[in-house]
Image (cartoon, helix red, strand yellow):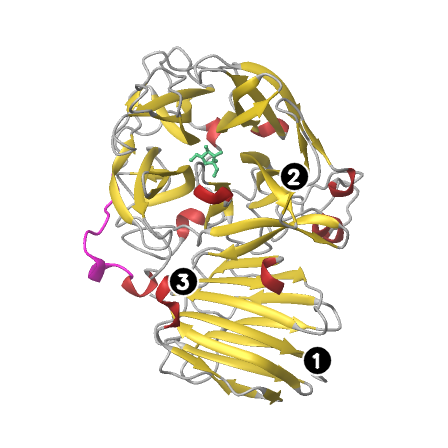
């Protein structure tokens, strides 16, 4: 199970005591590093490492993004909660480290709730506390050494500073792999209760607990193993959504991140749709495979190849290589469900060719449930900057039988492409992104109408040698909608996020273009495709 993990990052449960001072030689100026890969509208820490989003919460006009952070270096280690805030969910401002590791523990992933009724007693009626529920990964020589358990920290200043609870940990199972608590408030037969979804990562189980005060927890139920099982289950989330916008038809979505064993290889997120009664999650039979799939095994025990087709039948948040540990914000107004993921993959995470920072977040995605092929599926819409319409170019509709460059006035390094295309007689059509000046190397997004597959191929898309697992091509099944393929593509210096058919299918990949590869082209091969609409805008 661990064979695909990046060597530099041991599985959390196998961690030795983290080195006391693994301070890396981090460059302090942007010029000294890779400023050309610094995204315009994706969050990166200034000069340190980050992984999972943690404690996503809206409070008093601000969105808070906490995250797994190494405050002392740009590879995984010294796990603490970094912090950034935003008012528009696009532009983030880094804040001081919020919850730091110490001699006893590393601070692993978790969530934050607004304790409006001060059930925890950490605040007052007039100033309710924010409460963080995080995983303590206990270090050697401490009473809980070798185990992971759930702990609390609280803030009385709207999330800017945090105090660890003196009674930590609040929930133990004596387990080395019990982590990533996602807590939310649930109103059921027992009144208002807190519910925690966490994982027994190695057993591929989500475990549910209930509490009246966030301090005392009672076991409620467990779910799993099911569907994709090729790796550890991590960072769960559970939330309700109306189906097709109908408030009378509420379904619950259980998100389970998985590493490795995801559909594109390595880390990824699957989800289940079902019902939740405050204690037990019951999946709809239509979203369960009869037998789970071990997508991490290159070969199955009988010597045959991984069952890609069955892996594709699981429900995936994203079909690309780089969308992991995705979870949703709490306390968001208007019932909007907003998710964000780590734009990376444990297969090569510690080797990304950026400095002084390493790793970033995806765009925030608003998710909803829509009936597709007779059952509810997650549909995702990216949150974009309000000023996206500033520098815009629309191409003439019509036939496309070769390659056409998009205008250079809009930088191909940070752009939004909105397109509606029809295959016509073309065998394949799509876009070349981050194209070299000579019209050669590029990351290529291709739709093959006969196969019904959308493929993002980054093998010729710039720098790939930094890790043998990085060069790759990812495919997702995408059906035409009344003959049309609708694409929304966000390109941002070192990433491509593709939202197909209004967000029914999403494909996210990192790409590290060679210097000067800033072109974009639309193309058709083997016949004439039809451009019904094609607009490109600069993003910043
Ligand atoms: C997921 C994860 C979590 C854990 C954290 C440690 O990427 O392994 O399960 O809490 O990262 O950084």
Distance between mark 2 and mark 1 Cα atoms: 41 Å
Look at the numbered disc 1 and give the secondary structure of its residue.
loop
Residue 459 shows in the view: yes
Q: Which mark, by number, is residue 250?
A: 2
Looking at the image, which is closer to me, 103 or 407? 407
Left or right of residue 253, residue 24 in this image: left
Residue 375 in the image: state x and y as whole percent.
74, 48
Secondary element at tag 3: loop
Closer mark to the observer between disc 2 and disc 1: 2
CB under 8 Å between discs 1 and 3: no
In front: 513, or 534? 534
Q: Quick one: label 1 or label 3, which is nearer the N terminus?
A: 1
- Residue ID at (43%, 85%): 438
The span from disc 1 to disc 3 (Cα, nearest Å) is 29 Å
Q: Residue at x 62, y 19 (%)?
A: 189
State the residue position of label 1.
Answer: 427
Q: Earlier in the sequence, mark 2 or mark 1?
A: 2
Residue 410 tag number? none
Say which quadrant the C terminus sits in.
bottom left
Indicate left or right for 540 with 466 as reference: left
Q: Earlier in the sequence, mark 2 or mark 3?
A: 2
Q: Which residue is mark 3?
A: 494
Magenta residues span: 23-34
On screen, residue 532 above or below 299: below
Which secondary structure class fits the magenta region best? loop
- Packing grade of label 1 (10 A; few <14, some 14-19, many >=20) is some
């Amino acid at each position: 199970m661990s064979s695909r993990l990046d060597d530099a990052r041991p599985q959390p449960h196998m961690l030795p005591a983290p080195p006391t001072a693994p301070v890396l030689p981090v460059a302090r100026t942007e010029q000294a590093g890779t400023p050309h890969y610094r995204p315009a509208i994706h969050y990166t820490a200034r000069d340190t490492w980050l992984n999972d989003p943690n404690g996503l919460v809206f409070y008093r006009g601000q969105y808070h993004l906490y995250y797994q952070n190494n405050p002392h270096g740009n590879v995984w280690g010294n796990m603490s909660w970094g912090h950034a805030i935003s008012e528009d969910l696009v532009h983030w401002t880094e804040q001081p480290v919020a919850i730091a590791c110490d001699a006893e523990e590393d601070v692993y992933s978790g969530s934050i709730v607004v304790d409006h009724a001060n059930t925890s007693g950490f605040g007052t009626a007039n100033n309710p506390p924010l409460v963080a529920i995080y995983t303590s990964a206990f270090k050697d020589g401490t009473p809980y050494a070798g185990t992971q358990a759930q702990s609390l920290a609280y803030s009385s200043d709207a999330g800017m500073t945090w105090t660890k609870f003196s009674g930590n940990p609040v929930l133990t199972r004596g387990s080395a792999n019990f982590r990533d608590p996602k807590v939310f408030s649930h109103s059921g037969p027992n009144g208002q209760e807190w519910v925690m979804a966490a994982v027994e990562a190695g057993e591929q189980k989500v475990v549910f607990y209930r509490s009246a005060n966030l301090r005392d927890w009672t076991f409620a139920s467990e779910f799993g193993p099911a569907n994709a099982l090729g790796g550890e289950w991590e960072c769960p989330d559970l939330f309700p959504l109306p189906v097709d916008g109908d408030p009378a038809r509420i379904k619950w979505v259980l998100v389970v991140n998985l590493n490795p064993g995801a559909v594109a290889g390595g880390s990824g997120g699957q989800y289940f749709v079902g019902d939740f009664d405050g204690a037990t999650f019951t999946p709809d039979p239509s979203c369960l495979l009869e037998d789970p799939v071990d997508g991490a095994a290159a070969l199955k025990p009988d010597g045959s190849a991984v069952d890609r087709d069955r892996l594709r039948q699981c429900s995936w948040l994203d079909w690309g290589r780089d969308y992991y540990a995705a979870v949703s914000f709490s306390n968001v107004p208007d019932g909007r469900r907003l998710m964000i993921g780590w734009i990376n993959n444990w297969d090569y995470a510690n080797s990304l060719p950026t400095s002084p920072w390493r790793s970033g977040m995806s765009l925030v995605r608003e998710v909803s449930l829509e009936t597709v092929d007779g059952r509810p599926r997650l549909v995702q819409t990216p949150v974009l900057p309000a000023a996206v319409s500033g520098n815009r170019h629309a191409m003439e509709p019509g036939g496309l039988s070769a390659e056409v460059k998009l205008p250079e006035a809009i930088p191909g390094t940070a752009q939004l492409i909105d397109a509606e295309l029809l295959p016509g007689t073309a065998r394949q059509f799509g876009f070349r992104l981050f194209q070299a000046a000579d019209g050669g190397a590029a990351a290529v997004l291709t739709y093959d109408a006969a196969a019904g597959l959308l493929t993002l191929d980054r093998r010729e898309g710039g720098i790939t040698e930094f890790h043998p697992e990085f060069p790759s091509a990812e495919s997702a099944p995408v059906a035409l909608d009344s003959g049309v393929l609708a694409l929304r593509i966000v390109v941002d210096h070192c990433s491509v996020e593709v939202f197909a058919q209004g967000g029914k299918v999403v494909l996210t990949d990192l790409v590290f273009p060679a210097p000067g590869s800033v072109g974009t082209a639309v193309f058709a091969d083997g016949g004439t495709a039809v451009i019904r609409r094609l607009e490109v805008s600069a993003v910043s």
